[in-house]
Amino acid sequence: QTVVTQEPSFSVSPGGTVTLTCGLSSGSVSTGYYPSWYQQTPGQAPRTLIYNTDTRSSGVPDRFSGSILGNKAALTITGAQEDDESDYYCALYMGRGISVFGGGTKLTVL
Amino acid sequence: EVELVESGGGLVQPGGSLRLSCAVSGFTFSSYWMIWVRQAPGKGLEWVANIRQGGSEKHYVDSVKGRFTISRDNAKNSLYLQMNSLRAEDSAVYYCARGLRLCTGDNCNGFWFDPWGQGTLVTVSS
């Protein structure tokens, strides 16, 4: 059973930079997993931030960027704002139509 | 404007059934994969099932195989999730989303989900 791993929580100061990661319990994440990232605030539906590793979804500010760092997918927020305080989820495509979400990272901006 | 509106959630006893619907507007429904994702209270997102444009291909997470059936009616721009033999652990907000893929000709790969509906709450409890 493949598990997609994310940091449970992270903290960043306003204006700071933070990198959240998305890994695999076994193996490395590559572009072939087509990583995508979603932002969710309490009580709201998820919002798509990044797809295909590093492509920003329409309307997403350029302070959000995606990449592969080492053996993980990464979401970097540059110049964090208080509005960025949310839960962040990555999803990896496992092939044969199946996708798996990570457990999510709760980001605090303070 | 693209809109996805889920309905059909509610309280059901363990072992019971429920049918969720997702009404879509603002895009050509029949041209896209569609997905159900759920989120148990206080927990993360879980991919549940998806269905190809014409309905010929469907995939499920192992925990719902044999109990849940995803379907669609392209004439009605609607997506469905028939849930049978419901368990307490199926309690969650269920979201529908459009599935997007990278395609070169007929060769498609990857998946991401955008946009999302607002969700419908399913509670399985006696």
Image (spheres, coloured by chain):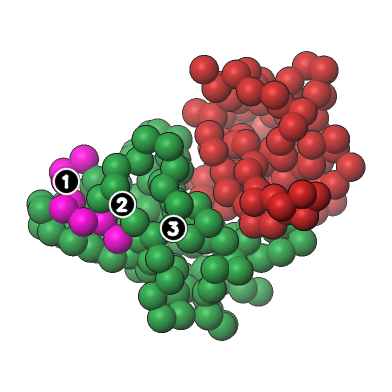
Chain designation of label 1 = A
Q: Are marks 3 and 2 in contact (CB under 8 Å)?
A: no
Q: Is residue A62 magenta?
A: no
Asked if badge 3 and badge 2 are on a common chain, one would say yes
Highlighted range, magenta:
A76-83
Colour of chain B as rendered: red
Q: Earlier in the sequence, mark 3 or mark 2?
A: 3
The secondary structure type at the circle numbered 2 is strand
Give the label, 1 or 3, closer to the camera. 3
Density class for disc 2 (Cα within 10 Å; few <14, some 14-19, many ≥20) is many
In the image, B16: left or right of B12?
right
C-alpha span from label 2 to label 1: 11 Å
C-alpha span from label 1 to label 3: 20 Å
Q: Earlier in the sequence, mark 2 or mark 1?
A: 2
Q: Type of residue at label 2?
A: Phe
Query: Is residue B53 at all visible to an observer of this figure?
Result: yes
Density class for disc 3 (Cα within 10 Å; few <14, some 14-19, many ≥20) is many
Residue at image mark 1: A81
C-alpha span from label 3 to label 2: 9 Å
Density class for disc 1 (Cα within 10 Å; few <14, some 14-19, many ≥20) is some
Residue at image mark 2: A64
Does residue B4 sit above or below A59 in this rendering?
Answer: above
Q: Type of residue at label 1?
A: Gln
Asked if badge 2 and badge 1 are on a common chain, one would say yes
Q: Type of residue at label 3?
A: Asp
